[in-house]
Image (spheres, helix red, strand yellow):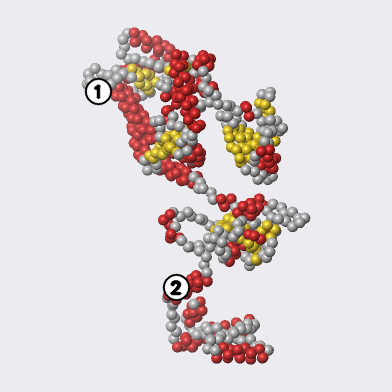
Amino acid sequence: MAPSGFSMKMRKHLKNKRLEVFRQLGVDRIIDLQFGSGEAAYHVILELYDRGNIILTDHELTILNVLRPHTEGDRIRFAVREKYPTDRAKQHSDPPSLEQLTEILQKASKGQPLKKILNPHLAYGAALIDHVLLKTGFPSGCALGKGFEMADIPKLMQALQLAEEIICEASKAPSKGYIVQKAEVRPKPDGSKEEFMTSVEFHPHIFEQFKNLPIREFDSFNMSVDEFFSTMESQKIDLKAIQQEKDAMKKLENVKKDHSERLVALEKTQELDKQRAELITRNQALVDEAVLVIRSALANQVSWPDITDLVKEATARGDPRKYEDLNDPYVGNMSDEDEDSDEDSKLKPMMIDIDLDLGAFANAKRFYDQKKMAAKKQQKTIESQGKALKSAEKKTKQTLKEVQAITNINKARKVFWFEKFLWFVSSENYLVIGGRDQQQNELIVKRYLNTHDIYVHADITGASSIVIINPSGQPVPPKTLNEAGAMAVCYSAAWEAKVVTNAWWVYAHQVSKTAPTGEYLTTGSFMIRGKKNFLPPCHLIMGFSFLFKLEEGSIPRHKDERRVRGIEDDNALTESVEDNSGDGNEEEIELSDDEAKDKPSLEPVKEVEEVNDQKGSDHDAEENDEAKNDGTPSFPDTEIVVKHTSDKTNNENEQKNQQQLKRGQRAKMKKIKEK
């Protein structure tokens, strides 16, 4: 993707220029970066407020390019060829006088916080205003008319003077940095709680409103700012995990609360049904008489309004039978307890629904049955409560473990500089990097190809540029060269085409960006001068691996695991393999005399091809005789001649050999052949 026009303009004017001046305009959030000096200077002005802006100007602050052209009011225009207005930046000013401060407070509405009134008119910031107000004796969060009166203006002037002194001290010498922290509690899967600190704010001074909070101190303000923003992302992940853990614990608490409330409701239902049944039983005669009266009235086809009138007349006469809610087939009976009952067994009167189809005992039995059903439900709830709580606790613990694992995974490690390229570490501990595209090929050669490094490329157009980083300056071993060559071939067009090709390598001084006269080198292309050292063809095979970071105590145990191995190391490895193979137990098979006779010979048959040139063979024999006379062992050359025979002859010989073997010898013969 091509860069934007603004980026191209910046590259054009700022290329090969040094940063000479870095300053702030006034006390505003505007930074001026000056590149170069004199008439060749260029300014990059950063506006770090509102939507932000980047302006490129010349040495006279005439705008050459602007990222976000706009207009402020009628006079200020941010466009090309316009002059950048440096006077628009907010300048440092003295605190307001007594008259100005009085006017500001008189315009403010009553009940408005004092900090909110002063903040637009001062350049101190809300945190410093809070600090000086508390220092001079004003209550926290004081407002106009609530903690502050107009008579306190002289005291307020003292607070503003204190703020001015703090600003002057901070501008004279570098100040320390402080991060205000807050304690957070995290639940663990085992039920315990863990406390850790999160950063809230950073300041160059310990303010009065934060003195009771935990504070981290740094040697400089820059270090505190760097620490605050570098840990911001990890803290967001931690806080998100804490919220998820709290939600999981809240679900568990809700399950416990729901079960407990259900048990309480069932107990209340049982008690209420028991009281109703007891009241009906104790007032059996009244209930039966009331039911009989209502039945008689209904049998005589008396309407419900007339029945209501009868009830009112009976009540006026002092009838102990009371009736309510006579618009339905259930009669509400206000039952009183017996006068002869003991005081311990007294029950309070209550409204009870009586079924007109049932008698007093039947209605009491109905409530007793309801009590029994509630008791069964309560028992089942108690039995299922243990299982439900165990299941909820198990899910909660699993959620806490998953949240903890996700939190640990999301905390990314520090990325190395070479990870943006294609890279691997060779078997001999050499770092090999390659470009993913033309821009990265250009970057690798220009920035990372040093004097002792090796440049590797596949013998095909459009392959990736591979560089073997060689900080020691020693010759790079052939094994690493072959591995780098395999990487170059695999990251080329040969991988898609499935074509095996060669790779070659050259030294760093042979790679140049200077093209011959009349030619042009595109991005990612280089001129190779001198001899190319070709590598043998390699297979199109690649693999993935895992790299583990070792602890300090484990590093000595893995020392020299990726060292350069020479011929002596290979010989030692071969001898150790031979020793191991000699130590193994070999299976011996004993054969009888008859079996030994029939056993076919397992020795290799050496067939020497006839040579027409008799002189050549005589000459070889003479050389062998001379070697014997010198006392050195000689070994004759062995040539194997493959004679083709017909399939019919082979089958006949095989059948003949099988017929000669006795019973049970074929399996043994097969084992001998396999061995």
| Residue 51 can be seen, yes or no | yes
Say whether marks 2 and 1 touch (CB < 8 Å). no
Circle 2 is placed at which residue position?
A: 580
Nearer mark to the viewer, of 2 and 1: 2
Residue 86 position within the rendered picture, expressed as x and y whole percent measured from the top left: 63, 29
Label 1 residue SS: loop
Q: Where is residue 108 in the image (x, y as percent from the top left)?
A: 52, 16
Q: Mark 2 to mark 1: distance in Å?
A: 96 Å
Residue 380 lies in quadrant: top left
Nearer to me, 527 or 292: 527
Q: Nearer the viewer, residue 207 or 336?
A: 207
Residue lying at 47% horizontally and 19% vertically, measured from the top left: 157
Say what secondary structure mark 2 lies in.
helix
Q: Report whether 79 appears left or right of 99.
A: right
Residue under numbered circle 1: 345
Badge 1 crowding class, 10 Å Cα cut-off, few under 14, some 14 to 19, many 20 or more, is few
In screen coordinates, is 367 left or right of 245? left
Q: x and y percent of residue 493 in the render?
A: 67, 58
Residue at the spot 44% in from the left edge and 57% down from the top edge: 555
Q: Which residue is drawn at 64% across and 82% down?
A: 644
Task: Give the amino acid at mark 1.
Answer: Ser
2 or 1: tag closer to the N-terminus: 1
Answer left or right for 336 relative to 490: left
Vertical side of 260 occupied by 667: above or below: below
